[in-house]
Amino acid sequence: MERERQDLQEQIEFDVTTIFYDILSNWWAVLLGALAAAILAFVIVNEIYVPEYTTRTTFVVSSKGDFNASANLSSTNNMAKTFQRILQSNVMKKILCEVMGVEELTDEIQAEVIEGTNLLVLTATADSPKEAIDLMHAVMENYTSVSYYTAGNAVMDVLEEPSIPMSPDNPLNAEDTVKKAFWITVAALCALFGFLSYMRDTVKREDDIEKKLDAKNLGSIPYERKNKTIIDLIKKDKRALLVTDPLAGFAFVEGYKKLATKVDYQMGKEGRKVLVITSVSENEGKSTAAANLAICLAEQSKKVVLIDGDFRRPSQFLIFGKMPEENQEIGEVLKGNAEASLILHECDIPGLYLILGKNCYSSSTELAHSGRMKQIIDICKKNMDYIIIDSPPTGLMGDAEALAGYSDAVMLTVKQNYIYSEDINDALDSFREHHSKVLGVVLNSARSLPGFGNGRFYGHYGKYGHYGHYGKNQES
């Protein structure tokens, strides 16, 4: 019974943080939808709005020749009620239709007796002020033709003349309707995006790694904002997020230090040196993760070389601000156009060395399978404690699998709530089919709310995201 209850809790479990950020990241859709609903509501309200103008007059009901009739309230009150029935009768309406030249009387006539008096209030309501006053005059001019046969010597004297109504009785109040439509749509769209977020089978929290993926959990890296200052925000500075940045957040730096400790332990206990870092899709932060992991390992007094193995879209030269010469390009070395002895770059961080490239090669698969790549790695293994290879995403023509073949282990960087769990497991299975050791998975860009889990919505990118624009640059 307890086990069944736990299974049920896992089935209905949802992550508040990811739902919140999924909704927040779609604010533009919510806003546009709400504005569209508000505009539509305004149009509909104006389309169906029918103004109502009412004019009224007050009559004193009395008997002909009986100047004391007003004193007999009971008698005159009965007369007034008789006139009320007359004015609302079908005969009267037929007469009014003939007088006004219409087939059917759509306007409204109301007659009401003021209780305890011989006063009768007549109201005429129509779609325009003119129609209302015309209807009232028609009643006043023609009521005697009906009342003569039914009310005997009773007469109605005008106590208050009717006036042209200047404003409708039901003024158009579109503002309230528009506001209701706006906020109801906001709530509905937020609920929709929240439901879609709940239904998406992605890695939303660190503990989802071992629940949903066939891999070891290596921890999580908290989300770190790139633009630290207002000036950076204005300039849209897209500098790399490195742990050496004085403005880097404490949790961000500690996340990579813990990751480096885990990697060092897992790799060291089995005598492994070469680690490929990749992802399922682009924009998951695998290059930044490779750079920061290399830095943290170097800060632990390890000799580390970081190789940019993404030959179609290299980025490490931008991350570290290094611009290799043509004869220092790893791509040119692999093509046999340069000597391997010149490609090692020293870094400002003690113990860290870089092998970089800045050119984009459409023949990346050939370069990844090159025997020279294996030679470079073998040379580095003799002199370094760790070789970190920044690999392309797993879907790019087998480049990642080829580099993994030269390595001792593979680490997958998974961006929070970004790629479906099924696609991640497919990538992990692909590495294992190529007999590569999967060290584990690290959750990247993990957002959190106090007291809740993590998550952010980035939309569905398919298995390989937007990596299709790789190779569009001219081969250097």
Image (tube, helix red, strand yellow):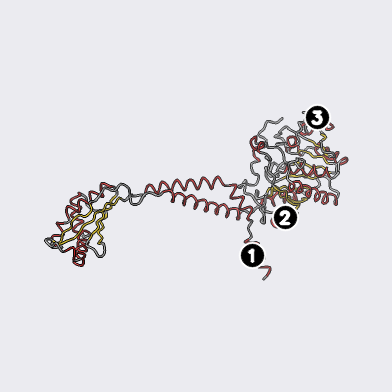
Name the residue type under label 3: Ala
Graded by Cα atoms within 10 Å as few (under 14), some (14 to 19) or many (20 or more), the crowding at tag 3 reads some
Query: Which percent across, then down, holds residue 421?
Result: 67, 52
Q: Position of residue 258 (x, y in %)?
A: 78, 50
Residue 31 seen in this snapshot? yes
Q: Gap between marks 2 and 1, in whole Å?
A: 22 Å
Percent position of residue 281, x then y: 67, 44
| Left or right of residue 439: residue 194 | left
Residue that label 1 marks? 8
Query: Which residue sits at x=80%, y=49%?
Result: 263
Estimate the x, y position of residue 101 in percent, counting from the top left.
20, 49
- Mark 3 → mark 2, Cα distance in angstroms: 41 Å
Depth check, mark 3 against mark 1: the one in front is 1
Q: Is residue 175 left or right of residue 151?
A: right
Residue flagged by tag 1: what amino acid is it? Leu
Mark linked to residue 214: 2
